[in-house]
Image (spheres, rainbow, N blue to C red):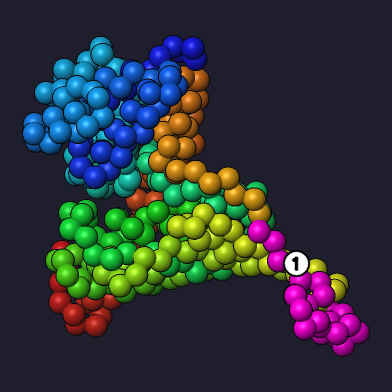
Amino acid sequence: MSAAVVRVAVVGCGAFGRNHARVYRQLQQESAGIDFVGVVDNNPQRAQSIAAEFGTQSIASIGDLRGKIEAASVAVPTSHHLSVARELMQSGADVLIEKPVASTLAEADELIDIASKTGRIAQVGHLERFNPAVMATVELVTKPMFFEVHRLSVFTPRSLDVDVIMDLMIHDLDIVLSLVKSPVREIRAVGLPVISDKVDIANVRVEFQSGCVANFTASRVSTEKVRKLRFFQPHEYISIDYGRQDVISIRVDEKAAAALLRGEVSPTRIGPAPGIAINKPKVEAGEPLRTEIGAFLSAVRSRSVPQISLNEGRAALALALQINEAIVKHHQRADLGGIS
């Protein structure tokens, strides 16, 4: 399929689906080997509006896509991921499934089983993995031991069918899991509903068996937008600003730092102390969604394992569900009442 045009569709025309449609339209206009066949939504008017905006067709149902596409983005509410992705894969289409991969681990396991039996490519849309700053950081990671992560957003009436863990924090859970590569040992968490009937703000401490500790704070009721990840590893501190797409690394030369502490050298008034190097790795600016879709289409053409597999999506979901369980237990201990 490497030289063939890939026929694609978008199922679900909400905010996420609209962005997928926009990128597919751009790729088609750039003659990037894409034929954007159409969009499907349970709201015909919304589907027609998105189709008109991005120069494609409004398709009545997923069944009408059978035999007409090789791949599709699944951007429906999480509770419908399994049913939609199942129908697409069983009809012969590869799928890019928005995060979280599913509502439950049982549903995620079923998706894994279907993809295996049908031989379909299935990628999970953990968008921040394709943030240029994150991609530039991967090669700097040695032995991360402490993370401090903040993801704060102003309130919007979007994704209120899920809590802030599934809506926002799961991005960072996925990234930290991909960098630490160690089983979870302990979770402590607190979360509260503020505007919606679900948890809108949460703070979580995760300890891994490797000894690494990660603190996560996520809020969708903030007065400002903050998306930062900072971590420490032996003799190095690395800071990522997702929004600005930049990375700062502060690395300490062990021998020079020891000499400084012994008083053998003197710190300067200008610049870092001797033995401390501040670097800004080169980051190629780009749109994460475009990179994500490009990676998906590359896997479709080459029939290779996608960059974010269903198993990785399942791992992030499993941790998110464990965090929600920890929040419920904290509510019970603090006598705060139930949460939905």
Q: Residue furthest bottom?
A: 263
Rendered location of residue 246, percent (x, y)? 56, 57
Where does the image place residue 131, in percent across and percent down from the top left?
49, 48
Asked if residue 99 is among those painted magenta in the image, a careful observer would answer no
> What's the residue at 75%, 75% (across, down)?
271
Percent coordinates x, y for residue 251 in the rendering:
72, 66
* Kind of residue indicated by mark 1: Ala
Q: Residue at x 40, y 27 (%)?
A: 27
Q: Say if the magenta span includes residue 259.
A: yes
> Does dot 1 land on a helix, a strand or a loop?
strand
- Viewed as shown, does residue 252 lie left or right of 60? right
User: Which residue is the extreme one toward the right?
Assistant: 264
Q: In which quarter of the image is residue 52?
A: top left
Q: Is residue 323 left or right of residue 156?
A: right
Q: Position of residue 257 (x, y in %)?
A: 81, 76
Q: In this view, does 218 lie above or below 180?
A: below
Q: Quarter of the image holding residue 123?
A: top left
Q: Is the magenta stretch mostly helix, strand or loop?
A: loop
Mark 1 Cα within 10 Å, few/some/many (few <14, many 20+)? some
The residue nearer to you, when weighing 47 against 160, is: 47
Q: Is residue 212 visible?
A: no
Check the picture and name the quadrant holding the C terminus: bottom left
Which portion, as a residue range, is magenta? 258-280
Instruction: Report the label total.
Output: 1
> Which residue sits at x=34%, y=51%?
317
Per the image, the residue denoted by label 1 is 277
Q: Choose top left, top right, bottom left or bottom right for residue 237.
A: bottom right
Q: Which residue occupies the foreground of this view, 283 or 184?
A: 283
Query: Vertical placement of 277 versus 17: above or below?
Result: below
Residue 232 in sight: yes
Seen in the picture, residue 107 relative to 84 is either above or below; the reply is: below
